[in-house]
Image (cartoon, rainbow, N blue to C red):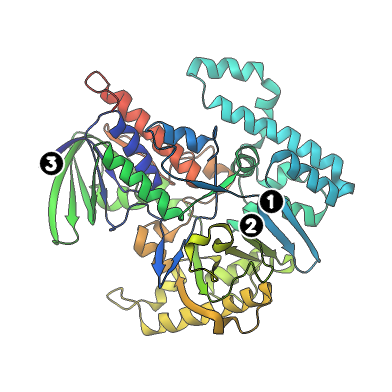
């Protein structure tokens, strides 16, 4: 049996961050990853010279003083990858109401642009952003304080604290609509919520303003070489600092005695053999539902805790259509990186249920189109382009295309092509490219079945738990568990999904474990 001080289950960004921090401190760390590439959703794949990025669009905090940079500096990786800075967050087009805007990222420029486009709403715009920008700044500073410092910080910022408390269990609409009445402006301000598959009257206000403002304060960035370059770099630095990474190592079960993980049983997917490994502490960056129901024997966790996990709803999964096309879109005058086209008449829960549950995608409320080659031309041959469109979907209705042995049927591949054709037509219409299908050299279509197969995430979820107010705030899952040496990280625990949030989760898990292990026998490499 192999023995380590820390064993990490899963090599998503959270697990890689935790592993790097602990390895840099000198702990003996091993990461187990079921796939043959690290990174989880944060990866790339190539087809005939085209590099595709299935999920990641942009990351906040990658500038000199940004949060992501500070995390990378904990293990001397801040200069190991180049990030490309976006000039604008999105090009927003309200198709039916004939309105469009190029949305600059910096906070002051964003507010100024909104006031210019909506002069009749200028007073409300400024009040809304002033009040909730102060809440986000307060939250960001509050997280850096000690327990004693937190109390003092609350009393010295009592008005902002009260505003934060009032927003905790509210959806976006409750904090936005007292200030804004224009329907186009309300949809534009809450665009990030729509991109997650939620309307402003569903999504957590606190989660939204944290996500929205983090880009305004710290900028939006994309890893040069694609999201997979970030995972690859994190894995390389981790190995350089003495960590061990086992790929193709699928965790099967945890042996727990006396509320303590005694060993982890994993299967080597190449050799088809099972092995045992042990660690003083275990950090889990894998699907939480699978962990508590399948990998741990009954009665390890309380019935209340298991029920809490099993009854929680997840976010949507996705359909992702990626195209390598024999056209230089920039030369054709298309300069956008993110083009989001909104259809107000389709933006309702009834239609959302039709698209996600009945797999009818003709009348979707938003088209999220990304041209990766306009930002990072290294993703394709010169003179060509990579473009993708992503839309949310549930996993369950896709299961009808599985055979008894869970293999995908011929009908699945036929239907997947039909769905691809629908979205290709949407891109063709948006970019005004006649006969786009004739210019396509490579096409890849991922469905919720694809995402579930790769990550084992419950429902193939993109962003962990459903983003409603209570679930994300007052009912959030903490990283501490009732198992003495088992700590959680990743999108299923606080502070939630997104690259920056899961990175913070990895940092929090590593901090908890290193504090427990102590540092008397360890020094920084």
Secondary structure beneath dot 3 equals: strand
| Residue displayed at 48% across by 36% down | 69
Label 1, secondary structure: give it. loop
Give the x, y percent position of residue 153: 60, 18
Find disc 2 in the rendering and name its residue: 194
Q: Is residue 301 visible?
A: no
Circle 3 residues within 10 Å: few <14, some 14–19, many ≥20: few
Disc sitting over residue 190 in the figure: 1
Q: Which residue is mark 3?
A: 2
Q: Quadrant where the N terminus lies?
A: top left
Up-down: is 399 above or below 273?
Answer: below
Q: Give above or below for 488 relative to 521.
A: below
Is residue 107 toward the left or the right of residue 16 in the image? right
Q: In terms of sequence position, does the residue under pointer 3 or pointer 1 come before the other?
A: 3
Q: Secondary structure at mark 2?
A: helix
Q: Residues within 10 Å of mark 2 (few under 14, many from 20)?
A: some
* Disc number placed over residue 281 in the picture, else none: none
Kindly indicate the quadrant of the structure image that contains residue 174.
top right
Task: Please state which of the two labelled residues, at mark 3 or mark 1, is closer to the viewer.
Answer: 3
User: Is mark 1 in CB contact (under 8 Å) with mark 2?
Assistant: yes
Q: Quadrant of the C terminus?
A: top left
Task: Provide residue 51's location: percent of width, then percent of height.
Answer: 44, 65
């Amino acid at each position: 049996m192999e023995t380590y001080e820390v064993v990490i289950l899963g090599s998503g960004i959270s697990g890689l961050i935790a592993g790097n921090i602990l390895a840099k401190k000198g702990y003996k760390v091993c990461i187990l990853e079921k796939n043959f590439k690290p990174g989880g959703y944060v990866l790339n794949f190539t087809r005939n010279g085209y590099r595709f990025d299935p999920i990641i669009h942009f990351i906040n905090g990658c500038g000199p003083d940004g949060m992501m940079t500070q995390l990378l500096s904990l293990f001397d990786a801040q200069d190991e990858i180049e990030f490309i800075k976006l000039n604008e967050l999105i090009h927003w087009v309200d198709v039916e109401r004939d309105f469009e805007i190029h949305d600059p990222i910096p906070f002051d420029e964003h507010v100024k642009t909104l006031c210019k486009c909506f002069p009749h709403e200028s007073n409300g715009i400024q009040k809304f952003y002033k009040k909730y920008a102060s809440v986000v700044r307060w939250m960001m500073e509050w997280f850096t304080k000690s327990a004693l410092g937190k109390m003092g910080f609350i009393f010295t910022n009592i008005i902002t604290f009260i505003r934060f408390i009032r927003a905790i269990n509210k959806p976006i609409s409750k904090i936005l609509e007292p200030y804004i009445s224009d329907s186009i402006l309300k949809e534009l301000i809450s665009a990030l919520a729509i991109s997650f598959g939620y309307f402003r009257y569903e999504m957590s206000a606190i989660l939204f303003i944290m996500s929205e403002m983090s880009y305004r304060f710290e900028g939006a960035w994309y890893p040069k070489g694609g999201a997979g370059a970030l995972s690859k770099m994190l894995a390389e630095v981790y190995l350089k600092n003495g960590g061990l990474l086992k790929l193709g190592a699928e965790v099967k079960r945890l042996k727990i005695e006396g509320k303590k993980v005694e060993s982890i049983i994993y299967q080597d997917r190449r050799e088809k053999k099972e092995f045992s490994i042990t660690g003083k502490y275990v950090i889990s960056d894998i699907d939480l539902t699978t962990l508590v129901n399948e990998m741990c024997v009954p009665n390890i966790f309380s019935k209340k805790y298991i029920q809490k996990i099993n009854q929680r709803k997840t976010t949507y999964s996705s359909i992702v259509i990626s195209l390598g096309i024999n056209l230089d879109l920039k030369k054709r005058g298309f300069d956008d990186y993110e083009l989001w086209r909104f259809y107000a008449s389709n933006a309702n829960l009834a239609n959302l249920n039709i698209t996600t549950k009945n797999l009818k995608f003709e009348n979707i409320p938003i088209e999220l189109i990304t041209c990766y080659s306009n930002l990072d031309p290294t993703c394709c041959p010169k003179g060509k382009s990579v473009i993708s469109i992503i839309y949310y979907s549930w996993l369950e209705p896709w299961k009808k295309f599985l055979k008894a042995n869970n293999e995908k049927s011929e009908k699945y591949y036929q239907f997947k092509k039909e769905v691809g054709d629908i979205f290709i037509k949407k891109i063709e219409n948006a970019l005004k490219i006649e006969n786009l299908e004739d210019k396509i050299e490579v096409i890849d279509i991922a469905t919720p079945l694809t995402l579930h197969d790769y990550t084992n995430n419950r429902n193939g979820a993109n962003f962990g738990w459903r983003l409603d107010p209570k679930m994300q705030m007052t009912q959030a899952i903490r990283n501490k568990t009732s198992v003495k040496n088992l700590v959680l990280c990743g999108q299923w625990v606080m502070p939630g999904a997104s690259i920056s949030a899961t990175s913070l989760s990895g940092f929090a898990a590593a901090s908890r474990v290193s504090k427990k292990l102590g540092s008397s026998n360890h020094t920084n490499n």
